[in-house]
Image: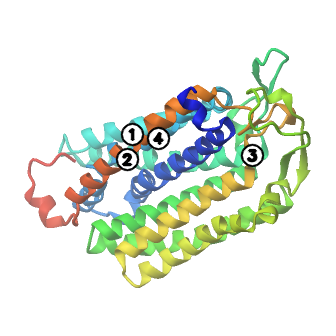
């Protein structure tokens, strides 16, 4: 028997759907705090030394955190090729905006302190702010558009056609609401990181802004759920599903129906834990910030992020990218994956390398543990940031 046949094709598809979710959560948690911290930079740091404290708190680790973004993109490319093709075509301008903002980050980190000039440094501080706030917003906007359906379809030869027009059609009310949820969530997480890694005025301001962001996360997430319930139609499959069938989206039929994104919660009550974790985590982050419990705050905000990201995946399952112009063309877990062999080989690679990445990341954070204070910044004349 061929080795990959020890795991059924439908099981592999579910495993890779779960792994994709884990990678997205990993990116949101690990890279989310430095995006949030950068977005808070103009508000929590008033002097040049304070800004260097904030930058030094994320400078040594932000680049390693980007690995989760690369892993997520690689998983989509290899495990879900049609998803990669449609999303990078349909969201091309949005992806370009994110890429531009992310490019500002390494340049800002490297060049900000090369000249002892206030104007020079303020310009790079603004670039770091853009590099944190813009991706946080656009990632959320993209999720909002996915929940509403993306304008694409397949022809009879399975060629993909994107039927959207401009970037501005992506900036609809529900998508912008999801963008605000993303910003509030990551600002809460970034504030939790700054409370953990800094002290004095920077930590105090971060605690104040983080408390507001935590409450905003709860309110906006609840509002998004209400909007999804009464204002956004979901999708459901109307034909027989073949979990081990070929990856042909047109082999099924699907339809749009009000409240369809909430059906999984009625069928599987345990899935209610996902939005519950999102709300409870944000509420706990607010309480722990007020109680000055630093580690508990960052853990609570991480729980909230995991719950919010999982809520999206659970609501849409088995859909991974619905089509707003032709529901039949929608991509699902059962008809958009790579081959049985490809998924198995990738699973073996993931089992080997993901634990190595986690172990190395854990070691790095152990080495970098401790607070960044103004005294150390002033004494470090050869600082990197």
The local secondary structure at tag 1 comes to helix
Q: Where is residue 201 in the image (x, y as percent from the top left)?
A: 29, 73
| Mark 2 touches mark 3? (CB < 8 Å) | no
Residue 106's place in the image compared with 296, above or below, is above
Asked if residue 281 is positioned above or below residue 41 in the image, the reply reads below
Identify which residue, 93 or 273, lies in the foreground. 273
Looking at the figure, which quarter contains the N terminus?
A: top right
Q: Which mark is residue 355?
A: 2
Local packing at callout 2 (Cα closer than 10 Å; few below 14, some 14-19, many 20+) is few
Q: Pointers 1 and 2 in contact (CB under 8 A)?
A: yes
Provide the secondary structure element on which disc 4 rests.
Answer: helix
Separation of residues labelled 1 and 3 (CA atoms): 27 Å
Which residue does the numbered mark 1 point to in the structure image?
352
Q: What element carries label 3?
A: loop
Mark 3 and mark 4 in contact (Cβ < 8 Å)?
Answer: no
**Mark 1 or 3, nearer chain start:** 3
Q: Residues within 10 Å of mark 3 (few under 14, many from 20)?
A: some
Mark 4 or 1: the one toward you? 1
Residue 328, image x, y percentages = 86, 33
Residue ID at (37%, 80%): 293
Q: Distance between the residues labelled 4 and 3?
A: 23 Å
Q: Judge the density around disc 1: few (<14), some (14-19), many (≥20) Cα neighbours within 10 Å.
A: few
Residue under pointer 3:
318
């Amino acid at each position: 028997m061929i080795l990959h046949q020890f795991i059924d094709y439908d099981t592999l598809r579910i495993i890779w759907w779960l792994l994709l979710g884990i990678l997205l959560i990993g990116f949101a948690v690990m890279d989310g705090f430095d995006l949030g911290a950068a977005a808070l930079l103009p508000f929590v740091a008033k002097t040049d030394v304070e800004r260097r404290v904030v930058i030094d708190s994320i400078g040594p680790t932000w680049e390693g955190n980007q690995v989760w973004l690369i892993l997520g993109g690689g998983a989509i490319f290899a495990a879900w090729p049609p998803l990669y093709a449609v999303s990078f075509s349909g969201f091309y301008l949005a992806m370009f905006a994110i890429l531009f903002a992310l490019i500002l980050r390494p340049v800002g980190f490297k060049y900000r302190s090369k000249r002892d000039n206030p104007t020079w440094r303020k310009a790079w501080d603004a670039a770091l702010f853009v590099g944190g706030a813009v991706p946080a917003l656009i990632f959320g906007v993209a999720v909002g558009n996915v929940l509403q359906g993306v304008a694409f379809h397949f022809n009879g030869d399975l060629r993909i056609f994107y039927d959207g027009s401009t970037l501005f059609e992506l900036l609809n009310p529900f998508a912008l609401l999801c963008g605000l949820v993303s910003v509030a969530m990551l600002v809460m997480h970034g504030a939790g990181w700054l409370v953990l890694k800094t002290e004095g005025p920077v930590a105090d301001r971060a605690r104040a802004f983080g408390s507001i962001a935590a409450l905003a996360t709860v309110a906006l997430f609840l509002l998004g759920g209400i909007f999804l319930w009464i204002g956004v139609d979901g999708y459901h499959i109307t034909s027989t599903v073949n979990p081990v069938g070929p990856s042909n989206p047109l082999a099924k039929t699907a339809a749009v129906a009000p409240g369809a994104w909430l059906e999984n919660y009625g069928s599987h009550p345990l899935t209610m834990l996902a939005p519950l974790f999102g709300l409870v985590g944000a509420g706990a982050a607010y309480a722990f910030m007020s109680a000055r419990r630093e580690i508990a705050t960052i853990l609570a905000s991480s729980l909230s992020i995991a719950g919010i990201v999982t809520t999206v995946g659970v609501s849409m399952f088995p859909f991974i990218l619905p089509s707003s112009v032709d529901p039949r063309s929608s991509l699902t877990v059962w008809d958009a994956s790579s081959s049985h062999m490809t998924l198995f080989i990738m699973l073996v690679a993931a089992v080997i390398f993901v634990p190595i990445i986690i172990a190395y990341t854990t070691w790095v954070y152990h080495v970098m543990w401790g607070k960044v204070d103004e005294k150390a910044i002033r004494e470090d004349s050869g600082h990197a940031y």
